[in-house]
Structures are given as C-alpha cells and as structure tokens.
Amino acid sequence: MDLEPTEIKAIITRMKRAHGHLGSVIRMLEEGSDCEAVLTQLAAVNKAIARSGYAIVATGLQQCLAESEDGLESVDVAKMEKLFLALA
C-alpha cells in the first residue's frame, strides 16, 4: 500500500497538529499543570492520532479496492482487518 502525499495531506496536517499538542502536554506536565487539564489535552492528542491511523487505513483500503476493480490486485481482507485492529 503506497500512499501518495497528495492523498494524505490532511492526515499529515492532523498529525503535525497532534505533535504540537503533545509538546504542549509535555510542557504542562513539566510546569505542574492541573491533572484534569493535562488528561483532557492528552485525550485530544490520542484521538487525533487514532483518527489519523483510521484515515490512513481507509485511504489504503480505498486504493486497494480501486486497484482490485481494475484487475491489478486483490484486496487482502485479513490484512486490512489486522491493520484496523492494530489501531483499536
């Protein structure tokens, strides 16, 4: 599954944003911020990363299905299921 950068631009942007938020969480911990605020931000980072992973798998699945329709490649359902479960 080779993904083109143009196909995953939004995913890359989301992951960069999550990276920045993670830096904020680390700073909050270093500064002794309120536990609830830290956990709220950490949950947001976790959700952004998980959604990025699902978007990558969905993009790959879409690409595999398109290739399958052209007769170039068959969809490996077990492989796609394993990728989704890895994110759970």
Image (cartoon, grey):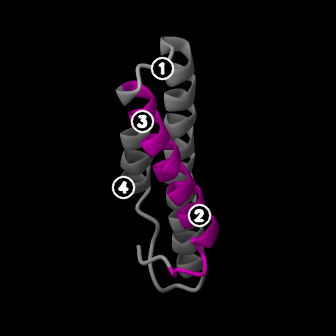
Membership of 15 in magenta stretch:
yes
The C terminus appears in which quarter of the rendering?
A: top left
Cα separation, mark 4 vs mark 2, equals: 26 Å
Question: To which residue does mark 1 refer?
Answer: 33
Membership of 76 in magenta stretch:
no
11 or 4: nearer the viewer: 11
Q: What element carries label 4?
A: helix
Cα separation, mark 4 vs mark 3, equals: 38 Å
Residue at point 56%, 20% (across, down): 37
- Looking at the image, do the residues carrying marks 1 and 3 touch, with CB atoms under 8 Å apart? no
Which span of residues is magenta-colored? 4-29
Residue 28: horizontal and vertical position, in percent? 45, 29
Q: Which of marks 4 and 3 is in front?
A: 3
Amino acid bearing label 3: Arg
Amino acid bearing label 1: Ser
Question: To which residue does mark 4 refer?
Answer: 79
Cα separation, mark 1 vs mark 3, equals: 9 Å
Of labels 1 and 3, earlier in sequence is 3
- Which disc number belongs to residue 13? 2
Of labels 4 and 2, earlier in sequence is 2
Amino acid bearing label 4: Lys
The N terminus appears in which quarter of the rendering?
A: bottom left
Vertically, is 58 above or below 81?
below
Q: Which of marks 2 and 3 is in front?
A: 3
Callout 3 environment at 10 Å: few (<14), some (14 to 19), or many (20+)? Answer: few
- Looking at the image, do the residues carrying marks 4 and 1 touch, with CB atoms under 8 Å apart? no
Q: Nearer the viewer, mark 4 or mark 1?
A: 1
Callout 4 environment at 10 Å: few (<14), some (14 to 19), or many (20+)? Answer: few
Cα separation, mark 2 vs mark 3, equals: 21 Å
Residue at point 57%, 62% (across, down): 11
